[in-house]
Image (tube, rainbow, N blue to C red):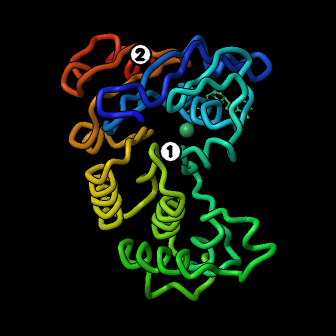
Amino acid sequence: MTGPGDALLEVEHLAKRFGGVTAVDDCSFTVEAGTITALIGPNGSGKTTVFNLITGYLRADSGRISFGGRTYARPDPAALYRRGLSRTFQQARVFPELTVLDNLIVAAGHRWRALFGPRHSRADVERAGGLLDEFGLAGHADEPARELSYGQRKLLEFASVLMSEPRLILLDEPTAGVNPVLIEAMERHVRGRHASGVTFLIVEHDMNLVMRLCDPVIVLDRGTRIAAGPPDAVRADPAVLDAYLGG
Ligand code: ADP
Ligand code: MG
């Protein structure tokens, strides 16, 4: 078991190059259980690449991660998902032709059941219905997901990752391009799930939101961690100001 204060996720010396570009460079940090941790940094500082390395969507050149006490030199998205690590994408990934409800059902990930059993388990349908209510999407349950607004798709993606009852959720820019009402909803859902025990690592560009929602805050610049700590300390750190203003 991992309790508050323990390292739920450890990122150790990750590195990734794309041709001549060093996107992530000897990057190490820890996400403690029970936190809403922010990962911030200027555009192109490697935040999304770090998410892709942690979750196994990209293969690191070197380094490793530990999640829930297990070490992975080659993380695999499906294996991590089953062990309780889920993520969203900067460009929300939903199945546009599936209904909103079915997007949640398939996210439950009982593939054997889809193949061999009744298509939808009663428990999954109930769980999905509860999430649609919670996320204000119940009225769209039977529409194809492509009918949703951009912000609603982001909410649907967030709801989808909750079908697997994750312990750690990585959100990549959950509020980018989302209207203020849905930004508030997003914040409320993060707080609610955090209160029920989920740990978050959030890439977020809205500094007001970061400062009121997240602690600690980790700052990347050119693929490396340059600061980490409580929001007030990070905000006052000259190296952080330099990274954002220095270009
Ligand atoms: P952030 O999410 O912080 O904006 P990214 O992780 O997306 O940063 O990008 C970090 C750097 O790696 C940037 O210079 C970007 O152009 C480069 N990069 C990211 N993904 C790729 C890729 N698939 N191929 C080539 N370069 C990439
Ligand atoms: Mg990014």
Q: What residue type is labelled 2?
A: Gly
The residue sitting at the front extreme is 1
At label 1, counting other C-alpha atoms closer than 10 Å, the crowd grade (few under 14, some 14-19, many 20 or more) is many
User: Marks 2 and 1, Cα distance to the nearest angstrom?
Assistant: 24 Å
> Mark 1: which secondary structure?
strand
Q: Mark 2 points at which residue?
A: 246
Q: Is residue 55 above or below residue 231?
A: below
For residue 112, the mark is none
What percent of the width, then of the height, locates residue 168? 46, 43
Using a 10 Å C-alpha cutoff, classify the residue at mark 2 as few (fewer than 14 neighbours), some (14 to 19) or many (20 or more). Answer: few
Mark 1, ligand 2, within 8 Å: the answer is yes
**Residue drawn where x is 26% and y is 51% of the image:** 195
The secondary structure type at the circle numbered 2 is helix
Q: Earlier in the sequence, mark 2 or mark 1?
A: 1
Given this view, does label 2 or label 1 mark the residue nearer the observer? Answer: 1
Question: Residue placed at 44% from the left, 88% from the top?
Answer: 139
**In which image quadrant can residue 77 be found?**
top right
Q: Residue 172 carries which label?
A: 1
